[in-house]
Amino acid sequence: MSVNAEKAMHLEADFLAGVESNLHAAEGGLLRGSIWQTARLDDEDRLRALLAENRTYDRERLKHLPANRRLALYGFEKRFIFGRRRTGVAIASTISPLPALVGKPEEVGPAIGLGELHDHVHKLVGEANMPHVIGVCSTTGFTPQALEAKFNIPKVSVVLIEPDGQGGWRVQAAGDAVDARLVKLFDPEKESDKVDRAREMIESYSADLLTGSLSASAVAKQANLPEHLVRMSFRQLANSDAELRLVERDGQFLMYRGAAGARSEKKSMNMIDKIKQLFSGEGDEAEKINLLAARRATLSQRRDRFYEDISKLEKKEADLLEEGKQAKSAVPRRRIAAQMAQLRKDIARQNTTGAMLNQQINIISTDIHNLTLIQQGDLAQLPDTEELTIHAVEAEEMLESLRADSEMVGSLEAGIEQTLMSDEELAILKEFENEDAGSETMATEPTVAAPPESTTQVASDAMPTATPPEPVDPAPGDSRKVDPEPS
């Protein structure tokens, strides 16, 4: 399980939130006691010291680190009038490799080993004679040695919890005499959440339903869930999808995709009638598709089991090959060679059986495809050629009529627009047009800048007025120009 510091902090919070509701629900029943006290503890002081050792003084870092938080419930019973007696302790504890996560918060923290788990459990146990129920959750998982540990401490039941990487939790007892109800008590995931998670995983494998089927046991193993919850998810999906079918064959609960339509079969039809209908040229295509799909689902599961066996044989062959390479004597090599020869023959036989199953599935899938096309064609109820021709002609006539009406309406609108205008409005429009034409003509002529009015006025006031002299005619033959006398 690859977990960094921030993810470990979220897992810690999710575990405590889910288990707390379970523990409170068990008060007075599975957990003895009529009076209960709740205590919340953590290793935040140790966490601050680790941050100081790493020269980190940012308080915001504390919000993104796990703190080995613990939830302890102490049960009591009334004794005499004012007295009370302790009946037991229930503790939900988390443990994370704090030094590693504080030093390198972005890297993956190591799993909790046997020694660290042993010290943690003995630290939680208080009074030796008091019944203790302890659930220890490691946010980074446990080592195989820690998972195999048996805490056979008197009056102490220990349960180990770790994330499974699929959004759920692995919960197991760490002892021989731990009640199964106590193990379930420390599972933080609700049953409804498990069903939803199973449905999500089934939907992620929905492509396998096109050519095969899904097995409830295989999905339960993949999702780390009880098989009865996966079957419940199968039923919910089948009720919401009309094409999904459920069948139980050879101890396997299978889901496959059949034909859309009614789910119920004809009660009067026995097995012989079903077989006759299956291989007849007439009949209900939906029933044929469902029968063939059920058969294909069974064959696909058998083929998958063959492939799993082949992979195991191939792994065994690889181990024998490595063993033969390591052997130095001729005697063990001959023995290993004989084993490998027989093993390869078995693998070839299994491959032949798998190929035959593939061919059978392919034939059935082809027949299902053809029947589906026939069924879809019947459901569509398409018109024949004569109806299509008649409708096309009617549509063409409708378009032509619509086009003619549109052109006529356009001409009427133009005439109506001119008719609705009065003579006065038409005259004003002509004035607008003449004004536009005049402004365009003026814009094309060059303009000469006139002198300022003030300058002209001053000059005229300053000059005296005088009568210009009369011109004198020059003498004949004289070409000189005679200027008037200055005033």
Image (tube, helix red, strand yellow):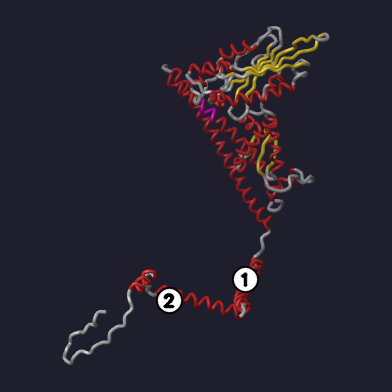
Looking at the image, residue 469 lies above or below residue 326 = below
Q: Is residue 379 left or right of residue 99?
A: right
All told, the count of numbered labels is: 2
The quadrant holding residue 143 is top right
Name the residue rendered at 59%, 35% in the picture. Answer: 304
In the image: residue 354, left or right of residue 287: left
The amino acid beneath tag 2 is Thr
Which badge, 1 or 2, is on the more N-terminal residue? 1
Image quadrant containing the N terminus? top right
Q: Nearer the viewer, residue 471 or 96?
A: 471
Q: Are marks 1 and 2 in contact (CB under 8 Å)?
A: no
**Residue 304's mark?**
none
Query: Is residue 387 located in the magenta-colored stretch of the structure?
Result: no
Locate residue 229, reporting x and y percent: 69, 31
Image location of residue 212, percent across then percent down: 61, 40
- Residue at mark 1: 399
Q: Residues within 10 Å of mark 1 (few under 14, many from 20)?
A: few
Q: Which residues are magenta?
A: 311-315
**Residue 441 position by quadrant:** bottom left
- Which residue, given by chain and number where applicable, does mark 2 sit on? 441
Check disc 1 and give the amino acid type.
Leu
Would residue 160 appear left or right of 101 to someone viewing this image? Answer: right
